[in-house]
Amino acid sequence: MKRTFGIKTGLLVVSFMALLLWTNLAYRVSAQSEGLNSISDQQVSTSNSIAQLNEEAAILYRQALENNIEEVRGSILRISKSLEHISFEGQTTVEGIHALSETVVEVKQAVVKVKNDDASLQQSSAKLRLAADSLANPTKPLWLQYYKIVKNDLDALSAATDQGQTAAVLANRYTVLEEHYETIRPAALIRREPYEIAQMDAWLSHTKGLTAAKQPDLAQLKSMVGHGEELVNQLFGREKDESAFVPFVQGPDRRAAGLLISSVIVATLSYAGYRKYRAQQQGIFPFRR
């Protein structure tokens, strides 16, 4: 009788342990599911906000080209307010966020002095348009289409250097290149590493000094143009090969897997104990030599 009571007690303990393990596992899986749903909802909300920002920036750009100043003012105010409610975590770097904010400030400043400088408003609105698009379209942003324009600017500067053009011509060629680069710079900074932009900025600064000299050093300028082509190719991703490796996908949580395995083992032991108990109740005992 005592032996039977001990077996029953053991079975109850084992069964209770199995129940606890299964309950823990079910709770953890449920919590993970709720967490994933929350993250997914937040990502959808952020994507929608960025898409709206991009649409508003496109509208602002068209209004700036049409010189609809009042409409531009309304758009830039809506964009400023929307930026306060967008979570940029995982969207871009701190430098990218700062670059986007700067374009908004530039548009605001250009609107104030638009009567004296219409071109300033158009350029600043173009910068904002490209920056917002870069944030909304990480794979194929519009600013990448500027590659041919910037490459042509470099070729023009290179040709002027080879021909030994005057300092005024060289300075003009550089100014056109710098203007196009400044237009895409915020958009590029949103998607590229800060060091890549820093390299390009340093190259432009040095090249500007060479072209601004009364008697430019043509040999050094030619060398700098060649280096600039490499940096431009790097900036626009023309020298980067697509990775042939499959991205790493994180497997299931190890703790959850451990609980599952432990639960299976406990359930198996419980069933074995139950079979042994039934056999003993029916007078069937394992044969021992």
Image (spheres, rainbow, N blue to C red):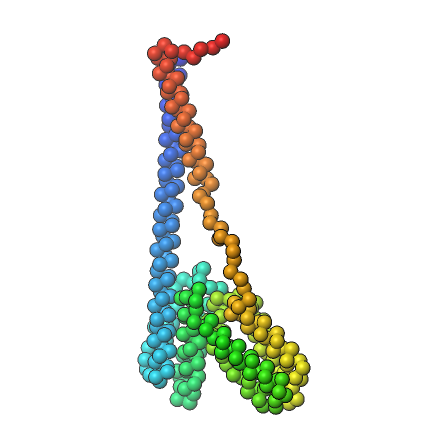
Q: In the image shown, does 269 or 42 lie closer to the viewer? A: 269
Query: Does residue 13 appear anywhere in the picture?
Result: no
Q: Position of residue 53 (x, y in %)?
A: 36, 69
Residue 2, located in which quarter of the rendered image? top left
Q: Is residue 60 left or right of residue 247?
A: left
Query: Does residue 21 appear anywhere in the picture?
Result: yes
Q: Position of residue 80 (x, y in %)?
A: 38, 72
For the N terminus, the quadrant is top left
Q: Residue at x 51, y 53 (%)?
A: 245
Q: Position of residue 143 (x, y in %)?
A: 45, 72
Residue 90, located in which quarter of the rendered image? bottom left
Measured along the vertical axis of the image, is residue 83 above or below residue 247? below
Q: In the image shown, does 266 or 70 lie closer to the viewer? A: 266
Q: Position of residue 188 (x, y in %)?
A: 49, 70
Q: Is residue 128 left or right of residue 208?
A: left
Q: Residue at x 38, y 11 (%)?
A: 284
Number of labels in the image equals 0
Residue 128, located in which quarter of the rendered image? bottom left
